[in-house]
Each structure stands twice: as C-alpha cells, then as structure tokens.
Image: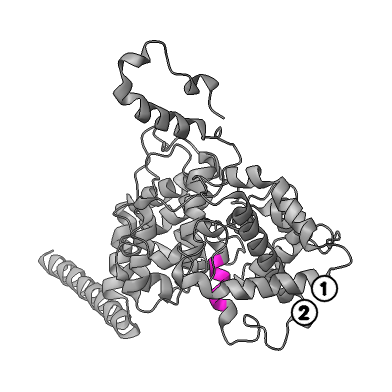
C-alpha cells in the first residue's frame, strides 16, 4: 500500500480548511493503490491498434476474466459456464469440491488482480466467483475437446454446428484472458504427467490453428512459465532460425540498411526476383538465395487477424525487443504488400492462401496490422540481413534488364518464338551485310 505519511495532514493545514475535503479524498485514492507488480501480463489493446477490426480483439461470444465481464452481448454464455462448473464438480467430486475451488482462487486473489494492467473494481466475492466460473469453463472446454466421451448430447458448444468456431477465437484475445497458473492450480487434483493443462491446451490450439508440429515445441513450452493463452499460442510457433548476422540495421558498407518500403512484391518482381513457397514448417524461415525469395505458406483469414493482432500487442507490451519476432514478421509482410497486386502475386505463387475474399481485403488486413509495426527504429530487426540481400540484388541493373526482357518480350511461347525469329533474322541480315562488304572489297582489289 502507499506510504502512511499520505494519510497525515501537515501542520498548519487548518489555515486552508476549504481544501481539506479534497485532500482527504485524494489521500484515500492514493492509499488504495497497490505497488506495481512484475506479474502484470493482461492489458487492453492500445488505441493505436484500434483501427484494426474490433472483432480481432474484442470477444464476440464469451467473456473470460474481468475486463469484459457483464457486457450485454456476452451474458448468454453465463448459464452455460455454470452448467460446465456443475458438470466438473460432479465428475471429480471424489478429489475436489466447490469449497476447495473457491479457497484456491481466494488464496491467489491479490496475485490474480496484479496480473491485470488496470484496477479491477469487483469486490472480493464477485471477483473470486467470476475467476472460478471462467477458469472451470476453460478447463471443461479443453477436456471435452480432448475426450469426446465427455461431450453431452445436448452440449451447446460441441454438439451445435460451428459453435466451437465462434467460441475458441475469444480464448485467444489478450483482453479476454485468465492467468495460466490458476487453470493449473484448479486442475491439479485431476492432473497427471500426461493429462495436464499444458498438454490439453497444446492439442486444442495446435489442432484448431493448423500449426505444423515441431519436435521441441512441447518441451520448450514446459520449460518456461506460461502467462496465459496468448503467450501459449506464441510459444506454439517455432523460434526463428538464427540469422548469419543481425547488425544494428547496418549494411555491408557500414551505412543504414535501406527499408523495402518501395520494394514491394511488384517492384521485386520487376527487378527479376523469383518467388517460391517455402518447404519449412517454420513460418519465420524466409530466405533469399540465387535470386529466389522463399516464403513459407501463410493463410490470410479473419482468424489470422485475431491471432496476429493479439500476439503483436502482447509482444510489444511484454517481450524484450530481441524477442519481437512476430512484430518483425508482420513488419516484413507489410513491406512486401503495398497494393492488392502484391497480394495477387503472393497468391499466384501459393505463398498466401487468401480466405478474406478479394485481394483488396487481404491487402487492407496486412496494412492495418503492419502500419503500427516499427521496424526502422529497431536495432534488432530480425530480417535486416534479408533486406540487405534484396536491396543488393535490386541495385544491379543487369537483373532489371533481364527481368524486363523476360516479362515484356518472352512472356508467352509465341512471343519467345517471335523474339528468336527476329534475332535470327537480325544475325542473318548482319551476315549478309558483312558478306556484301567483303565481296565489294574483293572486286575492287
């Protein structure tokens, strides 16, 4: 709590009696402030990202935690949450009880409150109640997804068409989170080494997000603390491959690496860069070799917007600058995409799977995300070396001339035949001219 001296009025205050009520009121507010906690990990999406679709960061079906609790559009799920709590307590009545669960949350109340970036106004009982109900709801969703035998015939999530598709995106939103440790603590009486919250969450998100499995993913998640589901999803992605060098945005001449703001997909194409869908399971493994830019396949959809928006906010608010690889990845996509034509090129080469509709919508989504990503000021931009390679390629006139020849004159088989025929005709004409000159010289001699 605040320093006790805040509660004490200084000597001589009697001469300013008219400010005493205000001072008393302000001391009460200051005295109610708890010390800032290093465990704070759940915050609202900042205004600078508010131009992104609101559906990308605001829950649409179910509220989790205190930040959106009680909103009109989300109240319909409250009864179902309580039904899931009842089912959980009945199934595991031999190892836990409602009272046990309440005590576990109550013991962690101050720690739980400190995990949120703003003061939670609910009183103790209401706060404990909503945390408990929401935590058991999440646990039940994970359990029922993992084991279909637990899905009741009239289950409103798993037995209704597409209901799970409406619910699970809300579980990935930063404003809609519970600290991960409370899920583990409530599940502890039921958990085994193989039947844990981490294992259940791994199967749930990996399957629904279609993330390619890497051998070290699960051990890496187990080896470090998990803040909440947004952090868990971030850890599902493999770490980026190590780069040859990551200078402070310096090129081979010691100067600043040029940004690729003007070298979008279309400009790179005109400079003779070839494109290929990458075979790597690691989405960050983008390579440029022998004039070919290789990018692992990515799906652009409303779901990817939800995912990237919340991962970006979490990285920018909680992670070190050297660990902002989601930020750098979106920043590089933003460099490549300037117009719908750029998206069309990415789709043409099977790098983008566009599920948001036309190319314009795909472009808008990338720009909305990327415009708020700062890569120029970063001293540790992950793709700095790749940017330098692309710039170096595009500075060579030969690559542009060769690309222009291919794109303008050799773009179809008939055009190629015509160019070859013209070249052959030109050579024959040249030979004929040389022969004529030689013949004239010989006749004069």
> Which residues are drawn in magenta?
165-170
Nearer the observer, 409 or 302: 302
Instruction: Report helix, strand or loop for mark 2.
Output: helix
Q: Secondary structure at mark 1?
A: helix
Residue sitting nearer the eye, 359 or 123: 123
Magenta-span inclusion, residue 167: yes
Q: Position of residue 3 (x, y in %)?
A: 53, 22
For residue 72, what is the image quadrant?
bottom left
262 relative position to 94: left or right: left
Q: Which residue is mark 2?
A: 150
Judge left or right: residue 182 versus residue 130: right
Dominant secondary-structure state across the stretch colored magenta: helix
Please identify the quarter of the rendering in which residue 126 is found: bottom right
Q: Residues at badges 2 and 1 in contact (C-beta under 8 Å)?
A: yes
Which residue is located at x 47 percent, y 32 percent?
28
Residue at (47, 48) in percent of width and height? 383
Q: Residue 204 location in percent, x, y? A: 67, 69
Residue at the spot of label 1 = 91
Task: Identify which residue, 71 or 16, lies in the foreground.
Answer: 16
């Amino acid at each position: 709590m605040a320093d006790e001296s805040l509660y004490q009025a200084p000597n001589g205050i009697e001469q300013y009696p008219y400010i005493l009520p205000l001072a008393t009121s302000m001391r009460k507010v200051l005295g109610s402030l708890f010390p800032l906690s290093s465990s704070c990990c759940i915050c609202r999406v900042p205004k600078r990202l508010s131009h992104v679709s609101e559906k990308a960061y605001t829950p649409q079906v179910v509220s989790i935690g205190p930040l959106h609790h009680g909103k009109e559009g989300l109240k319909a799920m409250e009864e179902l949450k309580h039904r899931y709590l009842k089912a959980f307590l009945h199934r595991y009545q031999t190892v836990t009880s409602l009272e046990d669960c309440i005590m576990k949350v109550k013991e962690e109340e101050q720690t739980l409150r400190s995990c949120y970036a703003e003061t939670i106004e609910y009183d103790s009982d209401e706060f404990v109640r909503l945390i408990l109900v929401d935590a058991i709801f999440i646990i039940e969703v994970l359990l029922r997804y993992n084991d279909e035998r637990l899905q009741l015939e009239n289950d409103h999530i798993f037995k209704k068409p597409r209901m799970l598709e409406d619910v699970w995106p809300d579980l990935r939103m930063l404003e809609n989170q519970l600290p991960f440790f409370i899920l583990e603590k409530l599940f502890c009486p039921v958990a085994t080494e193989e039947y844990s919250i981490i294992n259940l969450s791994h199967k749930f998100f990996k399957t629904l997000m279609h993330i390619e499995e890497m051998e070290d993913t699960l051990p890496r998640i187990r080896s470090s603390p998990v803040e909440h589901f947004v952090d868990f999803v971030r850890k599902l992605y493999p770490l980026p491959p190590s780069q040859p060098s990551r200078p402070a945005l310096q090129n081979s001449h010691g100067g600043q690496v040029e940004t690729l703001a003007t070298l979008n997909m279309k400009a790179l194409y005109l400079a003779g860069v070839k494109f290929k869908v990458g075979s790597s399971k690691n989405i960050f493994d983008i390579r440029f070799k022998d004039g070919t830019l290789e990018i692992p396949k990515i799906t652009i959809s409303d779901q990817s917007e939800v995912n990237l928006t919340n991962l970006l906010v979490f990285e920018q608010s909680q992670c070190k600058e050297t660990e902002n690889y989601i930020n750098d990845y979106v920043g590089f996509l933003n460099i490549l995409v300037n117009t719908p034509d750029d998206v069309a090129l990415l789709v043409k080469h099977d790098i983008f799977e566009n599920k948001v509709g036309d190319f314009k919508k795909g472009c808008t989504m990338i720009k909305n995300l990327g415009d708020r990503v700062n890569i120029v000021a970063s001293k540790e931009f992950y793709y700095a070396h790749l940017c330098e390679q692309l710039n170096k390629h595009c500075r060579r006139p030969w690559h542009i001339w060769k690309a222009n020849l291919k794109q303008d004159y050799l773009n179809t088989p008939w055009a190629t035949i015509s160019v070859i025929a013209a070249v052959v005709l030109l050579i024959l004409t040249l030979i004929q001219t040389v022969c004529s000159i030689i013949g004239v010289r010989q006749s004069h001699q």
